[in-house]
Image (cartoon, rainbow, N blue to C red):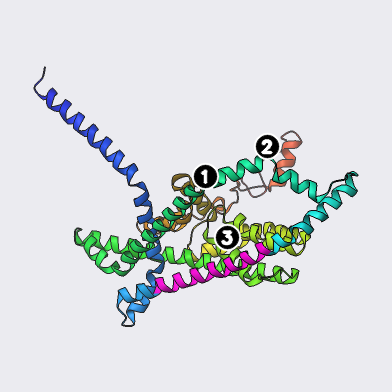
Amino acid sequence: MPAWLPRAMVMALALYGCFQLGSWAFYQLIGLLTNILIAFFLALAIEPAVSRMSGHGMRRGLATFLVFLAVLIAGIGFVLLLGSMLAGQIVDMVEEFPKYLDSVINWVNQTFHTELSRVEVQDSLLHSDWLQKYVQNSATGVLDVSTTVLGGLFRLLMIFLFSFYFAADGPRLRRALCSVLPPARQAEVLRAWEIAVDKTGGYIYSRGLMALVSGVAHYILLVALGVPYAPALAVWVGLVSQFIPTIGTYLAGALPMLIAFTVNPWYALWVLGFVVVYQQFENYVLQPKLTSKTVDIHPAVAFGSVVAGTALMGAVGALIAIPAVATLQAFLGAYVKRYDVTDDPRVHGGHRWRRGRPVVSRFRSAVRGGGGVGRTDTDGSA
């Protein structure tokens, strides 16, 4: 046996053990790493506001606290307003439910010539097996729901805590990172940080503009239909549809449809049609224009980045995919060498034809049997 073989086997086993240990630690800490990533992008989003306030003489920690306080007050106020509206509408729907049920039963009796009654329908529903099983499952799942809610609150608190430290200690963090790098690398790191702040802020700005346009459009529709709580519903549609990826559009449209149904069932169909039409307008007209102005990323690249982010990290990946790809694209674009494009018609989507007779005359000659093939043109070219 060669003398180096036992040492090589021990080294290979040690490397394999380190790899397994690292994989186990990574999967155990994947939740924490995801929260830190979200907190970092949230800190980048509020970085311009904090820097502007600290530039006017305010301490950076106090400026960060005020920005987070404003965001927290706005979020709590919106949730309380929406919760009171939902509570009132649910009470109204429960009180009006017998009337809705009577109208449905009357329509069924007239259409299908049946003799149903509301009392029979209620008894059959209350004594059905599936309802009893649903109540039992709901009672046993209360603890799981409570645990999920508490876990979500703890995760939200962790994200806000990390993002506060990232935003408040941003200069100190940059100095600590640059202190372990040579001067040339320090300039690149600072440039990448600046690009990340600019692109993330542009993404939030574009989402805010689209939320404003969406809220105003849906507010006009709800006011025209006479749906109550139109301002709160418009704010709900604008924020949820833009800042909750993938399923935000469906969540945003479901609540106005529910409230409109309490006024008139046909109004719910009007709201559904408007949501579908406006979503197409936003996807193909509004979003590409605003994204190209603020984030400077192609719509196809933006769509692909959202799909890839969702596949890798779920809803979190879909939310941060566009600013991350825009930052990477801008950073690479600053270091990739570019050349002047040749003046060729094919670059602009045209074709480069041979000089001589026009294309129509060449086609006619080919159809007639090639009589013009090889014949000298009037300008002397073959």
Image coordinates for residue 317, horizontal then vertical, percent: 45, 51
Image position of 316 with respect to 289: above or below: above
Question: What's the magenta region?
Answer: 67-91
**Residue denoted by label 2:** 373
- For residue 140, the mark is 1
Q: Report whether 161 appears left or right of 175.
A: right
Name the one closer to the observer, 316 or 183.
Answer: 316
Question: Residue 199, position in %: x, y?
Answer: 43, 63
Query: Judging from the image, what secondary structure is the residue with disc 1 in?
Result: helix
Q: Earlier in the sequence, mark 1 or mark 2?
A: 1
Label 3 packing within 10 angstroms: few (<14), some (14-19), many (20+): many
For the N terminus, the quadrant is top left
State the image coordinates of residue 367 (x, y, percent, origin top left).
75, 36
Q: Amino acid at mark 2?
A: Val
| Quarter holding residue 232 | bottom right
Q: Nearer the viewer, residue 353 or 333?
A: 333
Image point (39%, 57%), residue name: 154
Mark 3 lies on residue: 241
Mark 2 lies on a secondary structure that is loop
The answer to which of marks 2 and 3 sits earlier in the sequence is 3
Binning the other alpha carbons within 10 Å of mark 1 as few (below 14), some (14 to 19) or many (20 upward) gives: few
In three-dimensional space, the C-alpha distance between marks 1 and 2, rounded to whole angstroms, equals: 87 Å
Secondary structure under tag 3 reads: helix
Q: What amino acid is at disc 3?
A: Ser
The image position of residue 117, as x and y in percent, is 83, 49
| Camera-nearest label, 1 or 2 | 1
